[in-house]
Amino acid sequence: MKSLKALANKLADTDYQLEVLQREPERFPSFEEQLKTIGLFPLKPTGVEVFQINIGKMCNQVCKHCHVDAGPDRKEIMTQETMQQCLDVLAANPSLQTVDLTGGAPEMNPNFRWFVEGIKALDRHVIVRCNLTIIRANKKFYDLPEFYKKHDIEVVSSLPFYTQDRTDRQRGDGVFEDSIKALQMLNEVGYGKEGTGLLLNLVYNPAGAFLPPPQEGLKAEYKKALKQDFDIEFNDLFAITNLPISRYLDYLLVSGNYEDYMQKLITAFNPAAAVGVMCRDTISIDWEGYLYDCDFNQMLNLKVESKGKHISDFHLEELNQRSIIVNQHCYGCTAGAGSSCGGTTA
């Protein structure tokens, strides 16, 4: 137990994570070299359209696969001042049409609703990455489905599987039951229902050291099982590959699966998936307002290669010309059918 705790403490150090990812270059060819072989290095943006904002690492869950290492004990929360800076940038840059709010559980930020209302006042599409159980965690969250509906929020929620055992193993005891109740609450106000326009999309992450199965087939399985067993409906399912960073890297090292998993990702490298990676049209913003190419680079503290590295010094033209920072973890986004926050990319 002591050695596992020591490893977890090491993995909290982003420099150590990068050191692990860059081991054995003779076995694991660099991601940069892979991009060079297909003429895609340096990787460049296609044009920033999406603001993905992590408004805090506090969460009511502690999921085994979480690359944010979120949990109830995390204190990192975006301030209203930093949120206002984000709103100012959105107001000045109308091409930034989508705002994707993440955490932790973003709803646990005390200024979450104020921020959502500010973004909607600018007529932007808002995505909230809701872990579902937050809706059932406390009475003050029970009205979240109505709040989402009022502001036409796209809800994207993780549900590791459509059975209790697999979901609870990955996310904790009782998570499946609370998730089902939350999905039913969302359905009751119209989410996931045909003709309402209220989008409810689910996310699948593998529970072990393997790649997700084909997205469309998995979606059909989910739709059939959830409708049959719980009368639940949803719009789409996103199959997302677990990237070897933070808590998931911890799992891979402790279980002895790290080398095999990296080899799987490298062997499954897909040039078509590399063309469509999300970092080409997205900027990730952390709870302090610093800018990153993606949410995963954020967790490794790899800030953008740009003069303006903070939301207070945001220059869209400069960011559209930058070179995107890549490292070995990027194999996770380019394996098989590819992986992004919106599911497959190829």
Image (tube, grey):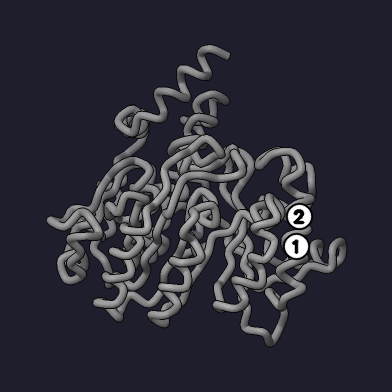
What amino acid does circle 1 point to? Glu
Tag 1 near tag 2, CB within 8 Å: yes
- Cα distance in 3D space between marks 1 and 2: 9 Å
What amino acid does circle 2 point to? Tyr
Identified at 51% across, 41% down, the residue is 70
Residue 95 is at least partly visible in this image? yes
Q: In the rendering, at what x and y percent does residue 320 appear?
A: 21, 68
Residue assigned mark 1: 221
Identified at 25% across, 56% down, the residue is 324
Q: Nearer the viewer, residue 221 or 55?
A: 55
Q: Secondary structure at mark 2?
A: loop
Q: Secondary structure at mark 1?
A: helix
Taking the view exactly as shown, the residue that stands out farthest to the bottom is: 195
Callout 1: 10 Å neighbours few (<14), some, many (20+)?
few
> Can you say which quadrant of the picture contains the N terminus?
top right
Callout 2: 10 Å neighbours few (<14), some, many (20+)?
some
Asked whether, in this view, residue 117 is left or right of residue 187, the answer is: left
Residue 346 is at least partly visible in this image? no
Asked whether, in this view, residue 6 is left or right of residue 316, the answer is: right
Q: In the rendering, at what x and y percent does residue 27 appear?
A: 36, 31
Taking the view exactly as shown, the residue that stands out farthest to the left is: 307
Asked whether, in this view, residue 255 is left or right of residue 69, the answer is: right
Q: Is residue 322 above or below residue 254?
A: below
Toward which corner of the image does residue 121 lie, by quadrant? bottom left
Taking the view exactly as shown, the residue that stands out farthest to the right is: 229
Q: Nearer the viewer, residue 189 or 109?
A: 109
Toward which corner of the image does residue 255 lie, by quadrant? top right
Residue assigned mark 2: 162
Q: In the rendering, at what x and y percent does residue 262 appear?
A: 45, 37
Q: In the rendering, at what x and y percent does residue 170 appear?
A: 66, 40
Identified at 54% across, 60% down, the residue is 129
